[in-house]
Amino acid sequence: MNEAPHVCCSGTVETGNDSYDLIVVGAGSAGFSAAITAAEHGARVALIGHGTIGGTCVNFGCVPSKTLIRAVEALHQPRVASRFAGIEAHSRLVDWRAVIAQKNDLVAHLRQAKYVDLLRIYDTIAYHEGRARLCDGGVALDGRLLRAPRIVLATGSAPAVPAIDGIDEIPYLTSQSAFELEKLPASLLVIGGGYIGCEAAQMFARAGVRVTLVTRRRLLPAAEPEISAALTGYLCEEGLNVRCGLSYRTIRPTEGGVALTIEVGGQEETITAEKVLLATGRRPNTQGLGLEEAGVALRPDGGIRVDARMRTSRPGIYAAGDVTGRDMFVYMAAYGARIAVENALNGDGRRYDARAMPAVVFTDPQVASVGLSEAAARDQGHTVRTSVLPLEAVPRALAARDTRGLIKLVADAATDRLLGAHILAPEGADSIQTAALAIRQGLRVQELGDMIFPYLTTVEGLKLAAQAFDKDVAKLSCCAG
């Protein structure tokens, strides 16, 4: 096992009987996963939290955003019900404050049930509140020294603020504060075209806000180009003003809100809105931990550098979750934390493996992906074959009279192995795990196409897309026979 860290901190700390087998810094998803894993291995654990217990996902991110997205879907579906002959429906938002209150109740319930109450179940986990700093022999916490031979850093991330001239002079929203608004603005400028920007922009637009979404590149730049282009079109059809491929010049307050000056094709123009939401990514929370003094190296993006076994550059110190700057999904935070703890306690035998990591963007249609993109596969030296199947070829989409989307599969031409799957579909999120299992098990495209899939499901589109490598699926009968 690695030697215990030997680092220093300034100030005087009191020593006592605060000795543990493991210290976990951070009480969000990664932190709780680490602490529970350690407790299950019989370790005595100090779990240190600062701020709202539970971290970003349950309090400010996944849970609030997805419940609000579902709420406005209930508004949107009646508006498009006329796609079915003979049906007319209407919807109306009567009390946004009540929507937010219901969301807050859910957040409070999950925070209590999945975080606070768990501390009573695991009697070998001692919870401490305060600002932690790495120190000789352990962690300094408000004048106390908590000792342990192993430490896991899991302090998460926070919304990033883009470098735009004047940004510090305006009152802006972030992905955390935007979902707390009890009064909807008349207009909203969303800066950033990643998953947070796309989800929030569509959600507010469906709630009746006039939304402009701006981004330097294209929407979802990590997604397949076909999916990015299609999603852009669908958002525009819903009335969003989507502006891609521009530069930010300045932003300033106005009497009615904010004004952003952009440059497009060498020409400047100004976009105004009542509120502005910054959705330009997240930055790892590494400030104040004493990492430099401890010899813990950082990545260029500011995240803590870890190897495949979740070890930092300092022996005895591990890191997991958003603070590492990679794979910023709650389930990957929990996964990485379990590996970090098991390695810390049992000798570094497990490796982090994200090759079959699914990712979902909860727009409508949803964007779901796993494995390599076409570009990434080529960069890794694969000779690539692709299949792009429009949703018009999927019976489920025809029956639902909603053919927005496509399915793209990426395969190795030499081995026929499935390398990546990318879905844009109203129910795409619930289909991606089948592709993840196929990639994890090393399935060939032919094997995926030969599998039995239930008829009139979105996931059947994976079978059709696999068959489309070598067949014209329009010539097949029902059930992709």
Image (tube, grey):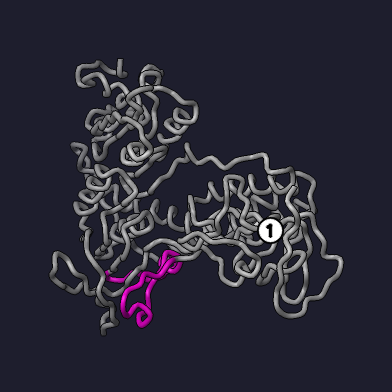
Q: What is the x, y in percent for residue 433?
A: 45, 34
Q: What is the x, y in percent for residue 83?
A: 20, 40
**Which of the 4 quarters of the picture holds residue 88?**
top left
The quarter of the rendered structure image containing the C terminus is top left
* Vertical arrangement, residue 142 with respect to residue 95, above or below: below
Q: What is the x, y in percent for residue 100?
A: 44, 63
For disc 1, the marked residue is 24
Q: Which residue range is magenta in the image?
A: 160-187
The foreground one among 232 and 395 is 232
Which residue is depicted at the point 34% across and 59% down?
Answer: 197
Q: What is the x, y in percent for residue 320?
A: 59, 53
- Observer able to see residue 404: yes
Direction from residue 411 to residue 332 in the image, left or right:
right
Majority secondary structure of magenta residues:
loop
| Mark 1 surroundings within 10 Å by alpha-carbon count, few (fewer than 14), some (14 through 19), many (20 or more) | many
The foreground one among 90 and 436 is 436
- Observer able to see residue 89: no
Which residue is depicted at the point 26% across and 23% down?
Answer: 468
* Vertical arrangement, residue 395 with respect to residue 297, above or below: above
